[in-house]
C-alpha cells in the first residue's frame, strides 16, 4: 500500500488559481457524475495515524476508484486558524474518506463524515482551504455511500443518493438518481417504501410548507393524469427541486394539454439549469405534437452565462428535443450544428472531455436526422478520450454512415472492449450491443469469464442473438 502523509502547513494565505468551472460554480448546478468527470483520480483513503494538535494524519491508499493513483506521497494540511476544524478533527483509525484529485488547477475535493472541503497546493503541501457545504446539494451521504455510488457509476450503473439542497432543514434530505449514461441529468426520485397517496392527500401536500413534502407529492402525482393541472402549478413552485419533480412526473403522463406544453416552454428559461434541461427533454418526448415549441427551443440554444453554461448541457437538451420534434424542419440543421460547435463535439478546452462524449451520444440517439454530423463523428473516432471514441463509434452506426467509417468504428469498439479502464470497456460492450454489432461477438466471447465483465458480456451477447 502506498501512503498519504497529511501534515501541518505553517504558511497562511490562499494561492491564485485558474479555477475549472465545475468547482468554481455553486454545486447545485452540478451532478455527481460531472464532478467525477472533472477529477482524473478518485481514491479511497484509510486513516492509519493522526496528530490533531499538529494537523498530521497518515492514510493508506485503500482503493483507486478512478484513474491513476498519486505517483508521490501527498501531504495535506488540515488546520484552519491554527487548529483542525471540529468537523474534521475526529478522524479515527481505519476511518475511510474519499479524495478527488488531479483537477487542472491541482486542487482536490475531500469527503469525510463531516462533509466536503477543498485543499490547495502550497510549497509541496496540500492545505485545507475551506468547506464546500454546497456540494451536499449533489451528494449528502456518508463516505462509504459515496464509494459505493462511484463504483456503480464507473461500472455503467444507476444510483440513488441523498442530497441536501438549499432551503431544506438541516436533517431533511431528498433523493436524486444519477445515470452513468446521462451524466448531465439529475432525476428526483421517491424513497423506497414511499406509501401510496390518495388524490385528496396529494392535493393537500401540494400546499405544504415543507419542500420535501411538496417535492414528493409532485413525484407521487405521476400516477394520476387528473392531477396534470397541479403538476403544471408545480412548475411555478419557488423551490427548484419541486419544479424539477413536477416536470419529471409529467414525463409519465400519456399526453399533455396545450396549457401544460405552454408551461413547459416557459420553463426553458428557468433560472435553474436542470429545470430547463428536463423541460426540453419532456417536450422532445412529445414528438411532432410539440412543433409549436420549436421557436422557444431554438432560443434555448443560446448561451446565457459564461460560468453557468461553461458546458452548455441544458442547451444540448433543447437541441436534441428539436431533432426529435421536427427532424424535417429548418430548425433541425441548426440543432445539429450546435452539437458540432466548439462548445460541444469540437470543444477541446481543458477539462471538457465529457461534453464531447455527451454530444456524440446525443447525435447517435437522434439517428439519421444527424447525418450531417458524420464527418465530425468519424474524426472523433480518434479522440484522445476513450469514452468519446466509443460514443462516436456508436453514433456512426446509429446514424448510418458509409461502410469505411462503420468498419473503423467497429475496430475502435473492438480495441476498447479488450483494454483500458473497466468503465470504458463496459461502455464499449454496451455500444456493441446497442448497434447489434454481431461481428464483434468473438471479441465479446473472449472475456465472457472475466469476473468484472461477464455480466455485461452476457447481456450484450443475449441482445446480439435477438
Image (tube, helix red, strand yellow):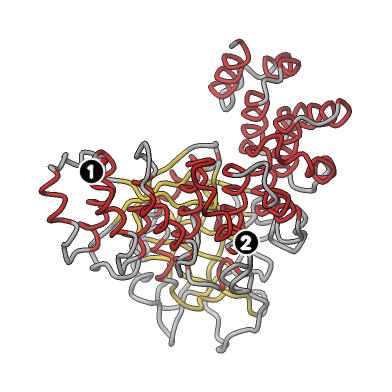
Give the answer, above or below, for where 164 lies relative to 279: below
Q: Nearer the viewer, residue 63 or 362?
A: 362
Quadrant of the rendered structure where residue 226 is? top left
| Residue 70 locus on image (x, y percent) | 65, 56
Q: What numbered label is drawn on residue 301?
A: 2
Judging depth in this view, the residue of 153 and 127 nearest the camera is: 153
Residue 215 shows in this picture: yes
Number of residues whose C-alpha sits closer than 10 Å to that of mark 2, classed few (under 14), some (14–19) or many (20 or more): some
Between tags 2 and 1, which lies in front?
Answer: 1
Give the residue displayed 57% in from the left and 48% down from the top. 321
Q: In which quarter of the image is residue 374?
A: top right
Q: What element carries label 2?
A: loop
Q: Which mark is residue 397?
A: none
Residue at 55%, 58% (x, y): give it: 35
Q: Of the residues under marks 2 and 1, which one precedes in the sequence?
A: 1
> Most extreme residue toward the right, as rendered?
404
Residue, far top: 465
Residue 90 point in image, percent of width and height: 33, 67
Q: In which quarter of the image is the C terminus?
A: top right
Q: Is residue 307 left or right of residue 139?
A: right
294 vs 9, nearest the viewer: 294
Left or right of 152 on screen, residue 425: right
Label 1 sits on a secondary structure element that is helix
Counting from the top left corner in percent of width and height, residue 454 is at 57, 21
Q: Mark 1 points at which residue?
A: 226
Residue 456, image x, y percentages: 56, 24
The front one of 326 and 403 is: 326
Amino acid at each position: 500500500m502506498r501512503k498519504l502523509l497529511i501534515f501541518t502547513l505553517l504558511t497562511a494565505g490562499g494561492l491564485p488559481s485558474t479555477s475549472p468551472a465545475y468547482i468554481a460554480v455553486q454545486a447545485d448546478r452540478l451532478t455527481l457524475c460531472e464532478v467525477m468527470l472533472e477529477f482524473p483520480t478518485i481514491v479511497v483513503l484509510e486513516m492509519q495515524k493522526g496528530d490533531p494538535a499538529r494537523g498530521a494524519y497518515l492514510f493508506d491508499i485503500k482503493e483507486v476508484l478512478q484513474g491513476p493513483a498519486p505517483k508521490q506521497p501527498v501531504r495535506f494540511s488540515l488546520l484552519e486558524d491554527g487548529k483542525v476544524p471540529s468537523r474534521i478533527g475526529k478522524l479515527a483509525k481505519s476511518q475511510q474518506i474519499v479524495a478527488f484529485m488531479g483537477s487542472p488547477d491541482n486542487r482536490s475535493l475531500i469527503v469525510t463524515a463531516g462533509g466536503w472541503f477543498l485543499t490547495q497546493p502550497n510549497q509541496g503541501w496540500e492545505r485545507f482551504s475551506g468547506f464546500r457545504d454546497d456540494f451536499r446539494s449533489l451528494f449528502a451521504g456518508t463516505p462509504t455511500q459515496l464509494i459505493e455510488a462511484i463504483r456503480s457509476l464507473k461500472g455503467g450503473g444507476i444510483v440513488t443518493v441523498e442530497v441536501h439542497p438549499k432551503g431544506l432543514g438541516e436533517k431533511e434530505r431528498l433523493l436524486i438518481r444519477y445515470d452513468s449514461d446521462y451524466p448531465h441529468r439529475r432525476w428526483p426520485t421517491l424513497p423506497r417504501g414511499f406509501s401510496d397517496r390518495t388524490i385528496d392527500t396529494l392535493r393537500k401536500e401540494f400546499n405544504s410548507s415543507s419542500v420535501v413534502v411538496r417535492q414528493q407529492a409532485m413525484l407521487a402525482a405521476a400516477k394520476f393524469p387528473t392531477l396534470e393541472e397541479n403538476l403544471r402549478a408545480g412548475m411555478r413552485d419557488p423551490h427548484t427541486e419541486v419544479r424539477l419533480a413536477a416536470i419529471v412526473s409529467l414525463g409519465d403522463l400519456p399526453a399533455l394539454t396545450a396549457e401544460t406544453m405552454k408551461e413547459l416552454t416557459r420553463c426553458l428559461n428557468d433560472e435553474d439549469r436542470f429545470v430547463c434541461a428536463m423541460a426540453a427533454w419532456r417536450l422532445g418526448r412529445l414528438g411532432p405534437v410539440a412543433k409549436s415549441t420549436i421557436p422557444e427551443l431554438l432560443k434555448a440554444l443560446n448561451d446565457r452565462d459564461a460560468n453557468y453554461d461553461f458546458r452548455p448541457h441544458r442547451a444540448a437538451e433543447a437541441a436534441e428535443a428539436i431533432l426529435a420534434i421536427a427532424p424535417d424542419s429548418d430548425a433541425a440543421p441548426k440543432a445539429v450544428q450546435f452539437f458540432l460547435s466548439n462548445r460541444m463535439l469540437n470543444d477541446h478546452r481543458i477539462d471538457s472531455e465529457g461534453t464531447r462524449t455527451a454530444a456524440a451520444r446525443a447525435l447517435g440517439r437522434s439517428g439519421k436526422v444527424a447525418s450531417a454530423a458524420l464527418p465530425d463523428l468519424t474524426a472523433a473516432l480518434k479522440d484522445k478520450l476513450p469514452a468519446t471514441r466509443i460514443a462516436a463509434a456508436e453514433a456512426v452506426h446509429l446514424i448510418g454512415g458509409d461502410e469505411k467509417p462503420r468498419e473503423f468504428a467497429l475496430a475502435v469498439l473492438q480495441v476498447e472492449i479488450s483494454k483500458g479502464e473497466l468503465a470504458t470497456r463496459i461502455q464499449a460492450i454496451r455500444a456493441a450491443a446497442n448497434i447489434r454489432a454481431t461481428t464483434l461477438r468473438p471479441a465479446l466471447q473472449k472475456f465472457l469469464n472475466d469476473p468484472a465483465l461477464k455480466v455485461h458480456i452476457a447481456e450484450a451477447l443475449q441482445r446480439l442473438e435477438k
